[in-house]
Amino acid sequence: MKKTTKLNRATTRIASVSALSAAALVACGGGGGDSAGNVLPEGVTPVSVTTYSATTVGSGATAATQDLLTGGIGKTGLGAAAAPAYADAANPTALELRRNALYSNYRGILDASAGGGYGTFYGPNVTVTGAVTTGEGLIPGREYVAVLDDGTGRKRVTMAVQVPDSFDIANPCIVLGPSSGSRGVYGAIGTAGEWGLKHGCAVALTDAGKGMGLYDMTDDTVNRIDGTRATRAAAGSLSHFAANITDAARAAYNALFPNRLALKQVHSQMNPEKDWGTDTLAAAKYALYVLNDRYGTAEIPVRFSAANTLVIAGSASNGGAAVIHAAEQDTTGLIDGVVATEPVTEMPTAAGYGIQFNGVAVTGYGRTLADYVTYGNLYQPCAALAAPAALTETGSFFNYMGFAGMTARATARCDGLAAKGLVSGADTAARSLDALNKLRNFGWTPDNDQMHNAHYGLGNGPILAAMYPVMYGKFSVTDNVCNTSFAQVDATGNVIAPLATKALSFATGNGTANGAPASVVYNNAVGGAKAWQFAVSPSTGVADFGLDNALCQRALVTGTDPVTGAALTASSTPTAAQSAAVQAGIAEVLLNGNMRGKPAIIVAGRSDALVPVNNNARAYTAYNRVVEGAASKLRYIEVTNAQHFDTFNSLPGWDTRFVSLHPYFNQAMDAMYANLKNGAPLPASQVVHTSPRGGTNGAAPAATAANLPPISASPAAANQIGFSGTSLAVPN
């Protein structure tokens, strides 16, 4: 346990500061400040310090209430179907954008419906002991925003350290929350943020080099760190991201491809994933600086350090990946414990370990994100038509979500794959089943079958297949890799000039090309550039979701033509050099399996089709045991009937069959905290068997404790996950 030094209980106070410039903030200092020995971590520039009192400040049109967790809207506001309105949506204020970013990021990965458990099992009104209150759960405190850069002015990692008023200097703790997915700095507010703030811990949020860096190639405008829009020149050092191109190059590109957009994670040319771990560690160091700045004294300028402050790294999805990277890279003992929910674990190999499920060896496992994403992007549209993949309660998911004609295009994808010899079968039924079996052999399982339609229908396959190879290859936005670009589109998939929603992108976007406002566009579509949903492939002449582009993206990862198997050349599309660049970038993000003996808990949903467990959670758990052996303190919790996006569970057909995974993140964090604070044993690795809510499609009964049984301190033998030699053994 880290609490080895008694803390001086004397406290100091600094004046409330809002929206300070970097120079003013450094000059202001705090209880200690740089001059007194509390030194900013290398590369960190403070941006602002704001006190959020959770009470109304101002009056009239400028009156506002904000807090650290909910942006002032509380449990009721986060649960509302619509985000709070702007006074002027064309010119939103930084405070409004922050409020709505908290709203969208909280709801982006959590089910905010009462039936799913919001307000009863989790939510701002639920206490750390699980008591359900009638309050709104606002948490007052101070938020310190800073930027981490590498000296180039291009890295621009945003960090926000939140210090609740309930922070106890005698029992200091920090929770690290790198953002999930590609989200901005508030991407972990509903997971690490809520848990940490409720426990009186400082919360160190970071976008880890991702986030809402939306750059408009046409007018040279950017998002500032606070989310407001400005030209690149006007934003200056507060620019979150701008493409690294000259005005001449931008003009030439715009003449050929007007109204295109660039995204930071994709087009920074820095492969930010390789730094997710070090960025998370930097946020921890900045959090210690913040605590010392606020509570340090002239006599004790550095009151908090890794030696006396409990540090838990906990997050989900890509955030879960970031905390695992951080644990592997933490050579100084900064992090005490790790909780990763549904993490992306970039496996360096599938050799030397194995996975058994229900006593049977698994044959497809341990693949990288780029590998299974580009493979899935090829086959998911076709596989979604297979009988085992149907969501019978809602009919076609494509049609339910309003994507008219997507079933016909998915059928065309099956036909195109068959014509190229990539699936077999005489008709769609046979071809789609073959495609589904290919996915099952590539790491997905039958538990994922009914998720493929959703992940393709919502564009997860096309979006990630377009984003990640470009990121790994460090390509410029002007490269149009695989004839793909990003833009806002209309209802028929045509590129249009970005609308007013660009001004709201900090609050509404999730850092991907999900249409808010950027979408994936295939420039080479027959008849002109079209969004992926509507693209007609040159080789097939039909609307098949741009099969040619999907084949190109797959070739970038493998280095071979998916149809012929021939190695790429200098004149092929893509080129051998482009593929080599992508493969080099993938090599930069691989994990090594060594968590350095840190206590850790990985939680994953068995039905997760976006980050399938055989390629991620199961594979990493098995590999870690091989690497660390008896020194490993990793526990693995697999939850049945849980999938990647809890937020989807409010949809008809999903409410009846899936349960929320988020309560198990909270339980894992509780278990880790008890272990580190009191020496309580971590729970054994186990399968938690949940019960779907059932009932009427679209009106499932509210989740109860029977649907969400807790992680067991002493799981039954039939539920225990163990090892058979070097193979992870997961029971049914």
Image (cartoon, rainbow, N blue to C red):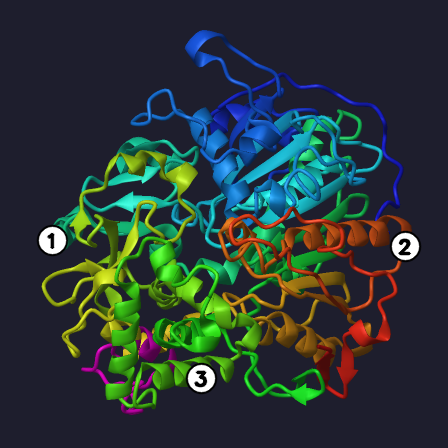
Residue drawn 72% across and 52% down?
Answer: 334
- Under circle 3, the secondary element is helix
Q: Which secondary structure dominates the residues rendered in magenta?
A: loop
Examine the rendered structure and indicate whether residue 107 appears above or below residue 707: above
Residue 252: give its label: 1
Question: As shown in the figure, which amino acid type bears the numbered disc 1?
Answer: Ala
- Foreground: disc 3 or disc 2: 3
Residue 110 position, x and y percent, is 57, 47
Image quarter where the C terminus lies is bottom right
For marks 1 and 2, the one nearer the N-term is 1
Q: What stretch is highlighted in magenta?
A: 551-575
Residue 198 in view (yes/no)? yes
| Residue 525: mark in rendering | none
User: Residue lying furthest top in this view?
Assistant: 59
- In the image shown, does 456 or 220 lie closer to the viewer? 456
Give whichever of discs 3 and 2 has the lower sequence position: 3
User: Can you give x and y, in whole percent of width and height, for residue 603 in the image?
Assistant: 68, 62
From this viewpoint, is residue 143 visible? no
Left-right relation of 157 to 171: left
The mark closer to the camera, 1 or 2, is: 2
Q: Name the residue under label 3.
A: 438
Reading the image, the residue beneath label 2 is: 679
- Identified at 69% across, 26% down, the residue is 135
Q: 525 left or right of 704?
A: left
Is residue 729 part of the magenta span, yes or no?
no
Circle 2 crowding by C-alpha within 10 Å: few under 14, some 14–19, many from 20: few
Of pointers 1 and 3, the one earlier in the residue sequence:
1
Q: Which residue is drawn at 13% across and 49% down?
A: 251
